[in-house]
Amino acid sequence: MKLSVIIPSFNDSRIVRTVKSILKQDFPRRDYEIIIIDGGSQDNDFISCFDFLYENADIVISEKDKGIFDGLNKGIDVAKGELIFMIGSDDYLIDDKAFDKAFSSFEEKNDLVIFELFYVNQEDIIERYWTLPKNLRKIPQHFQIPHFSTFISRKVIGDTRFDLNAYISADYIFFKELVQQDISTNIINVPICCMTSGGQSSKNFMNIIKGNIQSLRIFNYNPYNIFRFFLHKIQKKFVHFTLLFFQKNKKTVFQEKINSVLRSLN
């Protein structure tokens, strides 16, 4: 198996759209598996999707869990692919060549393949464009990697799992542990997916505060690393927002592409 796609879910019927966007990939279906880890959903709209999910996914596990990161851990445990890709149940792919590009890069001995992405609101309108530095082969430890647009070598993951005690910083810690290894990274400056805003780290101000406090602990309160971390966060948000503000024509083109993808998924 070349690729495992892990989708954690809970009471979100938009997962049908997510799966459809995966099935549209220009990549042999026999070469990837779809793993859905549901947290024991009881929502009627979601339950009505079960037939579609069981028909199109390779593995469906529905049981109570401890949240999204517990679901991702369960998915990693059962994954058989050489390359692991994780995507949220309310997110969707917009580049039909994403899997092909990622696996081609993996075959060139890259352990981490990172793409760009769009943050969209609940109406699928672009809010931010997550851009990445070009020609960056070594990822700094303070760098925040977008986990829902990143493909990871199964060998590199090894026994590393998301820390369930870290709450909303679990993804940051997870990737920090990975980049501490001697791995090769390829950044591809192409947006491949839309990530819907409203996750645990962005729902309210207190969650943001908690996440930042956890980040300080990760750096053992080292002033230099803390400074680099927050400087990166400020630069990242500034670039993401200004890129779209000053390039309105580009934003229009991107939005039209997203709208076209959404129409094809209905």
Image (tube, rainbow, N blue to C red):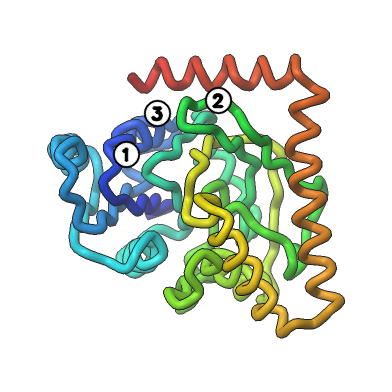
Residue at image mark 3: 24
| Nearer to us in this view, 188 or 14 | 14
Q: Amino acid at mark 3?
A: Lys
Evaluate if marks 2 and 3 touch, with contact meaning CB atoms under 8 Å apart: no
| Quadrant into which the C terminus falls | top left
Residue occupying the point 42% across, 47% down: 88
Q: Amino acid at mark 1?
A: Ile
| Quadrant into which the N terminus falls | bottom left
Residue 138 sits in quarter: bottom right
Judge depth for marks 2 and 3 and give the one in front: 2
Q: Is residue 249 left or right of residue 9?
A: right
| Nearer to us in this view, 98 or 216 | 216
Neighbour tally class for label 1: few under 14, some 14-19, many 20 plus, Cα within 10 Å: many
Evaluate if marks 1 and 2 touch, with contact meaning CB atoms under 8 Å apart: no
Residue at image mark 2: 125
Above or below — where is 196 with respect to 136? above
Secondary structure, mark 3, is loop
Q: Amino acid at mark 2?
A: Ile
Residue 51, position as x, y percentages in the image: 13, 37
Q: Which mark is residue 104?
A: none
